[in-house]
Amino acid sequence: MNKSPEEKKIDGIKELVDQIDFPIVVEGIKDKKALSFFGFEKIYTISGKRLEDVVTLVISSRSKSVAILTDFDEEGKKYFNRLVKLFQSSGIYVDNSLRRKIKYITSVQKIEELNFLIKNYVSKLNLLSCKTV
């Protein structure tokens, strides 16, 4: 059976989970929720916090690397650039592979849009299960 575009995207993201064993920084709780669905762990949000405090939290996790998965819009890019500088000045390596791959696989502008991908996929599964009854 051929996979739908949603299934291919979801599978592509799930394959990334095993490649990431360090913290991920996102903008908000909806972003964290979407990534958690795929199995990502150690997700820190910046919403309502000083960026310096988030950097301190990541440093306290004793990780030597971090992924920054802010949105791909102008505000998200500003957060990304500021966080890169803060992490690098603290000796933390910023791994951009997750950011690049999520953008390539999904073409989303905002990380929370992954929630729509998930909802569409689940809706299609529900429709399929109703048809088989």
Image (cartoon, rainbow, N blue to C red):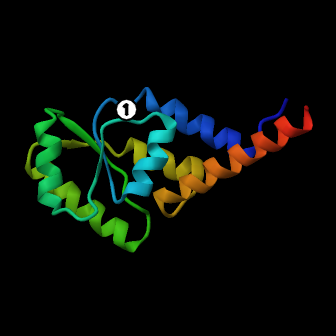
Q: Position of residue 74 (x, y in %)?
A: 38, 73
Residue drawn at point x = 61 percent, y = 47 percent: 118
Residue beneath disc 1: 20
Give whichever of 14, 47 is nearer the camera: 47
Question: In the figure, 52 relative to 7: above or below?
Answer: below
Query: Which quadrant is home to the N terminus?
Result: top right
On the picture, is 65 further left or further right than 31? left
Q: Circle 1: is it few (<14), some (14-19), or many (20+) Cα within 10 Å?
A: some
Q: Residue at x 54, y 39 (%)?
A: 13
Residue 29 falls in image quadrant: bottom left
Q: Secondary structure at mark 1?
A: loop
Count how many numbered circles sit on residues in the image. Answer: 1
Q: Choose top left, top right, bottom left or bottom right for residue 21.
A: top left
Q: Position of residue 7 (x, y in %)?
A: 69, 39
- 35 relative to 81, above or below: above
Q: Residue furthest front?
A: 133
Residue 32 locus on image (x, y percent)? 40, 49
- Left or right? Give the position of 69 relative to 123: left
Taking depth in this image into account, of 111 and 67 the one nearest to the observer is 111
Question: Residue visible at 41% across and 29% down?
Answer: 19
Q: Residue furthest top?
A: 18
